[in-house]
Image (cartoon, rainbow, N blue to C red):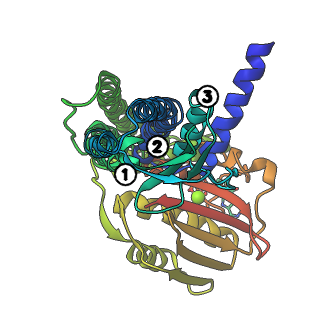
């Protein structure tokens, strides 16, 4: 129970960061490395300063107070002027403490509002170890601390303590060193990360190309991690198998269709020799139907064959299609927006669009074809004002040989392969053909071709 709650929280965090963090693997991997690194740096710096830093300052303050005690004892043991001067000289030289004496009493010590950590430690040490009235001022400038101590003979000992005696090193240098080191490591991380990610990028490009039925660039996958190499090898195998199966399918289709043509022709000849009767007429119609279907298959198989994708101006294909199907009595509007250059197999794509537009012209008298370039794809929309297709039939009409109008008469068309072929072509380009209701009352067919 508890574990599932925890993993739930993590899952939520992951989802949140999925939405709000950069989308490239490179940037994310960097964040995954850099954020913990920075946190670690900050934490260790904080720990160093707050724990060890305090400790060291505390020790230095205690040492200072011991020195002061030594000076006080020396002064009370050797009160004469000669010794006093000697003490002052030596303490300045050897202890870095600048001592002077005056008559009087020390100023009352008042806790200042702002106290730095050094002064606080010194104050603590003086309190604990000296047992004499003292005055402390950390605000005199010059990188010094002023301590006044009441001596027993009515003298006051004034000591100027340079900060060097009380602090360790410069924190600035520490920070600069840390930052410099972090930058160097960061640079190295970027470099190595790039190297690791190049094969993944190549794999992505290749998979994208394969999905769009384009030429798959050969990429070297000698470098990279084992996982990436495995994925690349798997992809490679998949690509070969896919290509082989497509080829096999097309070849088989072409072979079967071709071989069926010969007996069909023979049947037609035999039928022609038979005397006319309603039965032979029916048989002849069926044979003609079969022949049309087989021609359709063959045309499809041939078109798909070995055509390679090339950079093509889709508007030219659209013009071609329109010129091919336009009839005098029907209106066909053609328009496009944006750059129509896209990599595709022109003959196949022309077949796809011709099938769709000729369908529309067959069922309607007004047809509008419009191509729009989007961010990731070009969409060709074919609208007509014909009878349309009921939405529950949208998927059926893509099935081979499926026709809404069951009578295969010559007026209303062919064998029912047009839309299947159109969709097949679009999908082999990584796109699709979908149906919707047209604002003109008829059918809207949308062909999406990825860029
Ligand atoms: N624009 C359209 N308006 C109304 N119905 C349509 C339209 N386009 C297609 N259909 C219906 O979908 C069915 C399947 O179309 P498809 O293009 O696959 O075959 P087809 O046109 O009958 O024959 P083929 O295109 O192979 O000569 C058609 O028989 C028709 O009933
Ligand atoms: Mg058709």
Q: In the image as oriented, which residue stretches furthest toward the front?
A: 80
Earlier residue among tags 1 and 3: 3
- What is the distance, in whole Å, between disc 2 and disc 1 at their CAs? 26 Å
Kind of element beneath mark 1: helix
Neighbour tally class for label 3: few under 14, some 14-19, many 20 plus, Cα within 10 Å: few
Kind of element beneath mark 2: helix
Instruction: Work out whether 161 lies above or below 374.
Output: above
Residue labelled with disc 3 = 128
Q: Is residue 212 left or right of residue 308?
A: right
Q: Please count the marks in the image.
A: 3
Earlier residue among tags 3 and 2: 2
| Residue 277 position within the rendered picture, expressed as x and y whole percent measured from the top left | 63, 44
Neighbour tally class for label 1: few under 14, some 14-19, many 20 plus, Cα within 10 Å: few
The residue shown at (39%, 51%) is 299
Q: Nearer the viewer, residue 249 or 19?
A: 19
Tell me the tag on residue 182. none
Residue contact at pointers 3 and 2, CB within 8 angstroms: no
Residue labelled with disc 1 = 172
Residue contact at pointers 2 and 1, CB within 8 angstroms: no
- What is the distance, in whole Å, between disc 1 and disc 3 at their CAs? 32 Å
Residue labelled with disc 2 = 31
Instruction: Work out whether 195 lies above or below 139.
Output: above
Q: Which of 451 and 308 is in front in this view?
A: 451
């Amino acid at each position: 129970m508890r574990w599932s709650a925890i993993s739930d929280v993590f899952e939520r965090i992951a989802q949140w960061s999925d939405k709000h963090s950069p989308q490239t693997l490179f940037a994310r991997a960097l964040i995954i490395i850099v954020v913990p690194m920075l946190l670690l740096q900050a934490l260790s710096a904080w720990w160093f300063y707050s724990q060890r830093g305090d400790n060291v300052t505390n020790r230095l303050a205690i040492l200072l107070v011991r020195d002061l005690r030594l000076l006080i004892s020396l002064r009370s043991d050797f009160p004469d002027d000669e010794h006093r001067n000697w003490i002052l000289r030596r303490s300045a030289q050897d202890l870095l403490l600048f001592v002077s004496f005056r008559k009087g009493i020390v100023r009352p010590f008042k806790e200042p509002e702002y106290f730095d950590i050094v002064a606080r430690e010194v104050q603590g040490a003086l309190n604990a170890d000296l047992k004499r009235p003292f005055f402390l001022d950390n605000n005199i400038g010059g990188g010094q601390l002023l301590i006044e101590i009441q001596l027993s003979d009515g003298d006051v000992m004034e000591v100027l303590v340079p900060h060097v005696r009380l602090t360790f090193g410069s924190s600035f240098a520490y920070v600069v060193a840390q930052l410099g080191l972090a930058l160097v490591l960061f640079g190295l991380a970027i470099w190595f990360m790039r190297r690791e990610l190049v094969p993944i990028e190549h794999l992505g490009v290749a998979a994208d190309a394969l999905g769009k039925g384009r030429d798959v660039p050969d990429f070297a996958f000698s470098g990279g991690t084992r996982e990436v190499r495995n994925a690349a090898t798997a992809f490679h195998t998949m690509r070969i198998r896919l290509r082989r199966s497509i080829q096999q399918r097309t070849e088989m289709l072409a072979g079967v269709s071709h071989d069926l043509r010969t007996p069909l022709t023979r049947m037609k000849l035999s039928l022609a020799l038979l005397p006319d009767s309603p039965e032979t007429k029916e048989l002849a119609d069926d044979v003609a139907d079969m022949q049309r279907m087989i021609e359709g298959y063959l045309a499809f198989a041939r078109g798909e064959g070995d055509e390679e994708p090339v950079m093509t101006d889709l508007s030219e294909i659209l013009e071609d299609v329109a010129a091919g199907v336009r009839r005098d009595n029907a209106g066909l509007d053609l328009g496009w927006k944006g750059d129509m250059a896209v990599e595709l197999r022109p003959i196949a794509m022309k077949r796809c669009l011709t099938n769709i537009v000729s369908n529309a012209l067959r069922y309607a008298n007004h047809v509008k074809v419009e191509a729009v370039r989007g961010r990731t794809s070009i969409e060709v929309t074919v609208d007509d004002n014909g009878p349309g297709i009921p939405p529950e039939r949208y998927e059926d009409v893509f099935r081979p040989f499926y026709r809404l109008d069951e009578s295969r008469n010559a007026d209303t068309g062919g064998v029912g392969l047009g839309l299947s072929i159109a969709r097949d072509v679009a999908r082999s380009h990584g796109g699709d053909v979908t149906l919707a209701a047209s604002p003109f009352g008829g059918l809207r067919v949308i062909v999406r071709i990825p860029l």
